[in-house]
Image: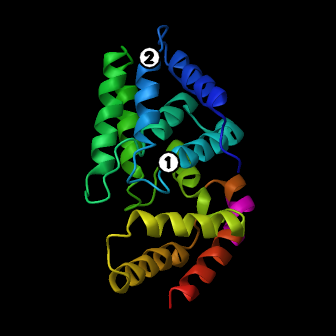
Amino acid sequence: MQPLAPDARRANWQAAWRALGVVAVDEALRAEIERRYTEPQRHYHTLQHLGECLAWFEREKAQAERPAEVAIALWFHDAVYDVHAHDNEAKSADWARDAMHAAGVAPEAAARVHALVMATRHDAVPVGRDAELLIDIDLSILGAEPARFVEYERQVHAEYGFVPPEVRRPRRREILQRFLARPAIYATPRMHALLEDRARANLARSIAALG
């Protein structure tokens, strides 16, 4: 999936906030989030990843119950990313909720977006159509064309380059095996049909390469 270009990202941002009833869309906030995705410690969790996620959203948004909330959650889901921390999702979710409160969005919508961002911890089966779509989009990279998947694996290893290979490689293999062991990687019917088989082939090749 080709990432959304900058103008398309901006249009996506504006459309999401306006759908939530915000007239004066905060462009400085968008710029700050985009800046975060260019931080030097990032190799995979970059504007490329954000743009790919938003491109999938534009393709699949008709599947969402509340598409604007899914879009906002995608913008924020990796907004905070410290490779040494374990609370990135919580900090990103809090930032999203606070930004929505500041913009005057209904508290229940802000709470739902907070929950969506927290779902990207991938520590539980997503519940609800919007969470399923969000997680499928976040995991779309697993079903990417093989060349992009190989690039993704290099990017992930680069982000954790400070971890010795004898520790990093077994941990990475364990993570990939957990995804492969799921009865289904993708929950939404369309993305399952498009990506499930290729994701399983990608994962199997990567696990084999890791020894």
Residue 82 included in the magenta stretch of the image: no
Does residue 105 show up? Answer: yes
Q: Is residue 120 left or right of residue 140?
A: left
Which amino acid lies under the numbered mark 1 shown in the image of this protein? Thr
Picture disc at residue 46: 1
Instruction: Indicate the position of residue 117 as horizontal and vertical percent values.
Output: 40, 44
Is residue 130 depicted above or below 125 in this figure?
above
Residue 196 included in the magenta stretch of the image: yes
- As helix, strand or loop, the secondary structure at mark 1 comes to loop
The structure residue drawn at horizontal position 68% and vertical position 60%, both measured from the top left corner, is: 192
Instruction: Indicate the position of residue 169 as horizontal and vertical percent values.
Output: 42, 82
The structure residue drawn at horizontal position 43% and vertical position 76%, both measured from the top left corner, is: 172
The structure residue drawn at horizontal position 45% and vertical position 26%, both measured from the top left corner, is: 31
The mark tally for this picture is: 2
Is residue 89 depicted above or below 197 in this figure?
above
Which amino acid lies under the numbered mark 2 shown in the image of this protein? Asp
**Towards the viewer: 49 or 143:** 49
Instruction: Indicate the position of residue 170 as horizontal and vertical percent values.
Output: 40, 84
The outermost residue toward the front is 40
> How many neighbours does mark 1 have within 10 angstroms: few (below 14), some (14-19), or many (20 or more)?
many
Q: Quadrant of residue 148?
A: bottom right
Range of residues picked out in magenta: 192-197
- Sequence-wise, the earlier of marks 1 and 2 is 2
**Towards the viewer: 188 or 103:** 103
Circle nearer the viewer, 1 or 2? 1
> How many neighbours does mark 2 have within 10 angstroms: few (below 14), some (14-19), or many (20 or more)?
some
Q: Is residue 187 left or right of residue 32?
A: right
**Towards the viewer: 14 or 2:** 2
- As helix, strand or loop, the secondary structure at mark 2 comes to loop
Residue identifier under label 2: 26
Q: Main secondary structure of the magenta part?
A: helix
State the separation of the CA atoms marked 1 and 2: 21 Å
